Image (cartoon, rainbow, N blue to C red):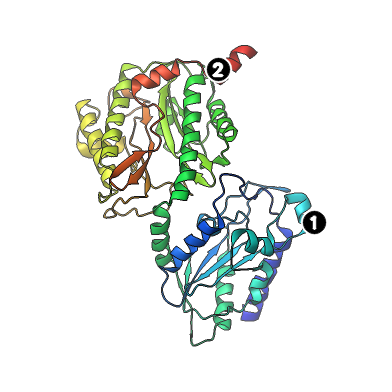
Amino acid sequence: MNQNTSYRRFSYLLVFWVYFCPLGLCGQFSGEDVLSPEFYAGRREALREQLPPKSVALFVASVLKERSTDQHYPYEPQADLFYFTGIREPYVFLFIFQNGEEYLFTPPRDEWREKYDGPRLGPEEVEKSLGIAHALPAERLGSWVPPMAAKTMLLDPLPKSVEDHVMDTLLTNLKKNITLGFADIKRETTKLRDIMDQLRGHKTVEELKLLREAIRITCIAHEEVMRSAWVGISELEIEGIHELVHKTYGAHTEGYHPIVASGKSGCILHYQKNDRSNIGAGELILMDVGASYGGYSADITRTFPLGGKFSPAQRLIYEVVLKAQEEAIRICRPGRPVHDITRLSMGIVAEELLKLNIIKKKDQVRNYFPHGATHHIGLETHDRGPYGRDDLMAAGMVLTVEPGIYIPTESPCEEKWWGIAVRIEDDILITADGYENMSRDLPKAPDEIENLVQQEGSFSRIKKKTE
């Protein structure tokens, strides 16, 4: 394919995106869950301070995913682009130059499409409301000549749905147009990934305010479910209670697909079916669910016995997980390796499983605790941030602490342990001199859990009235 053909292909694709693809289900947030244009401008300036000389960073929006012939799935913005702009529309390109210039290309207003899909911002409103210095119609990107030179383009990892030839053609066009002493533009992803891990791994005061609200709403929902769950309830009904509580209290959506796993399904770490009905008394229900507020997601897990009482075996496993979690939370402070959370919690679980004769050697702990015990949270559930074994906790990080034990049926241990799955997860803010458990208001001690489950909740009262 010659350069002219490639250029035309790119231009046609842009025109198709801009004029024929809907922007429905992409509305901006409104109210208290909106950060100011000054916040986003500050984030862009923080990026510039770390960019190499004579470089430009490019961020590309996610695209809509088709659900049926005339409908798309609810839109989720590309997290880094949202971090710098607050924009929640697809088909957007953002260029941030190290020398201070910035350009955002966005679909123009379209009265006809907006009748179907709702209002678009358009370039003028982007400049006015979001504070972007230069906003241009997206179709102009194909012929745009940047007003300054750059020798390095730092790229965010592109959404899988954005085809490589789009970027290749864009780079070809930029190389052709930028002629001020630079023979080539290098394409680099590693440097930008490292920069973004540092920026997004340390939350600002504004971000923490949104995270606190997401966590507060999530705690309310978990507590309501534990009060309301009745013998015979389904996983889908539990998921529905979570979602209704989230939206009632102002959450936009969930940060990830809710995990509501009953009985042996709890041994499936990313269980998503949530389709089991008629859950029996005494079965454990593992709920890993987090509300998203203003784009920021909580991530909390509780495990409880339906009907109100742990069996002796369930309680023993629960207490092991709780001990591991509490000890791991206690070591959270600046200067401590992030990996210590997993190392310590896994060591405690190994020691306790040896005592219970569930494993014979410490290294067998991975059979029943196969995942890491921490990750960053924020705009994404597993958010950007330093994850290396030598990376240290620092003030402003928000980390989960989430040990678990999962014992599938037919495991090489006593049958009384089979099918038990327990995970306990809280959201921990690293402070200047230690930590703050941001989800501390949600009960997790076994006696507290049993007491909570035996109370009557709002939804269980409604069910009684309709029987």
Whether residue 439 is situated above or below residue 104 in the rendered picture = above
Q: Amino acid at mark 1?
A: Trp
Whether residue 332 is situated above or below residue 83 in the rendered picture = above
Q: Quadrant of the N terminus?
A: bottom right
Q: Amino acid at mark 2?
A: Ser
- Which residue is drawn at the image coordinates 42% and 68% (left, top)? 49
Instruction: Report the side of 383 relative to 432 (left or right).
Output: right
Q: Which mark is residue 460?
A: 2
**Where residue 423 appears, x then y in whole percent?**
37, 32
Q: How packed is label 1: few (under 14 Cα within 10 Å), some, or many (20 or more)?
A: few
Q: Earlier in the sequence, mark 1 or mark 2?
A: 1
Q: Which mark is residue 112?
A: 1
Q: CA distance from mark 1 to mark 2?
A: 47 Å
**Where residue 311 appears, x then y in whole percent?**
35, 17
Of 134 and 383, nearer the camera is: 134
Question: Residue most toward the bottom?
Answer: 181
- Which residue is drawn at the image coordinates 67% and 72% (left, top)? 140
Q: Which mark is residue 270?
A: none
Marks counted in the figure total 2
Whether residue 241 is situated above or below residue 269 in the rendered picture = above
Q: Is residue 60 visible?
A: yes
**Where residue 115 appears, x then y in whole percent?**
78, 51
